[in-house]
Amino acid sequence: MEIHLASMENITCWAFRSLMQGVTDSYTGMISMGYLLERNKAWKEVDFFPINGQRQWLQVLTSKEKECADFLKRVNEKLSTSQTLALGGKASSNEKLGEEPEKDNCHGIQLNCSCPSPMIIKIGQGSALIKRPLKVASLVKELLKQDKYKVSVKTRLGLNSFEVRERRIFKLLEELEKIKNPNFTEVVVHFKHGKENSDTLYDYSTLKEICDYNIPIVLNGGINSYRDYNNIIKTIPKRKNIKGLMIGREVLKNPDCFVEVSNMLNCTLFKNRSFEEINAEFKKLCEEHMPREIYLERIKNSCVWNK
Ligand SMILES: Cc1cc2nc3c(=O)[nH]c(=O)nc-3n(C[C@H](O)[C@H](O)[C@H](O)COP(=O)(O)O)c2cc1C
């Protein structure tokens, strides 16, 4: 079972991601694709140094196919080792080293269709995309015009309660289901709409229907333990499409929240650490690859264990 550490802007840097035991998949915070194309500085956030046992994902914001195409070229120029990135279905003979080949550990690209920020919605990105299934499918297809990176989508149930009533997510899943490329690996569903605040309770009542689509699903929202996960899935008769779960805010309280989940679901033997041990390990990881100051500040302010 896949166990995902959620994308958290200005928090999930390499050192933070590396700290987690039992995580199979982790993400950078959301990064604007336009920003990655325009500013070299933005690549500091793309910190895919190796992490044993974790698949690392780059989460991007965009609503433009042209940006996706340009981005694929740029990512190759930046990260490529001697591996070939087949662009547009044709193997390119790029045997050149990229600018930062030590970061060539990106497993996949995730399209963010979930960010509820008004600024992002205003420019048609994040959760503004949920009601545009054809656009999302077209962006995904553009990102799939290479054979090195997997592609996934993170979505909410809708932009607002109206879109939930209008069953927008089902139209989106219907369109995504048509993409038969095996490199399109999953849809992460954050079980809230974009206007619900962090205290609103999660509503998993649509999960049974979501599982009927032929798409692997990762569950996200309010899952803090193995028990929470079990309570959600126990009422679902057809679980074959549930590929995993994703945890976000609980990690800020306890980075070892994955330990029990992993030991129960994946038969691992991880052990819980004290906050002192976690802090010491985090410090060491930061020395190895120092995150930007904003990450250190955010982590200090949001994480009870990082004092
Ligand atoms: C501080 C913070 C930053 C976040 N940044 C992002 C982000 O960059 N991209 C994203 O898809 N979700 C982001 N999220 C949402 C989380 O990935 C996750 O979907 C949400 O917290 C629900 O999961 P949880 O109930 O386990 O926390 C953020 C959440 C928090 C608390």
Image (cartoon, rainbow, N blue to C red):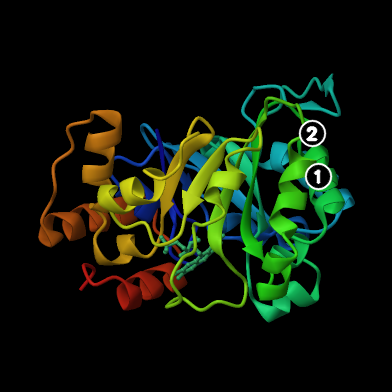
Question: For the residues carrying marks 1 and 2, which lies nearer the camera in this image?
Answer: 2
Percent position (x, y) of residue 126?
Answer: 69, 64
Q: Residue 253 versus residue 282: which sits nearer the camera?
A: 253
The residue beneath circle 1 is: 137
Q: Residue 178 carries which label?
A: 2
* Residue 275 placement, left or right of 242: left
Q: Does residue 67 appear anywhere in the picture? A: no
Q: In this view, does 230 lie above or below 250?
A: above
Percent position (x, y) of residue 64?
Answer: 85, 56
Percent position (x, y) of residue 58?
Answer: 59, 48
* Residue 184 placement, left or right of 137: left
Percent position (x, y) of residue 140?
Answer: 77, 42
Q: Does residue 264 appear anywhere in the picture? A: yes
Q: Is residue 117 above or below residue 207?
A: below
Q: Is residue 173 above or below residue 55?
A: below
Q: In which quarter of the image is the N terminus?
A: top left
User: In 3D space, how far apart are the residues under numbered discs 1 and 2 (Cα atoms)?
Assistant: 9 Å
- Asked whether mark 2 lies closer than 8 Å to ligand 1, one says no
Q: Residue 67 versus residue 193: which sits nearer the camera?
A: 193
Q: What element carries label 1?
A: helix
- Which residue is drawn at the image coordinates 75% and 50% (left, top)? 172
- Which residue is drawn at the image coordinates 85% and 45% (left, top)? 138
How many neighbours does mark 2 have within 10 angstroms: few (below 14), some (14-19), or many (20 or more)? few
Q: Residue 47 versus residue 8: which sits nearer the camera?
A: 8
Quadrant of residue 129 in the image?
bottom right
Amino acid at pointer 2: Lys
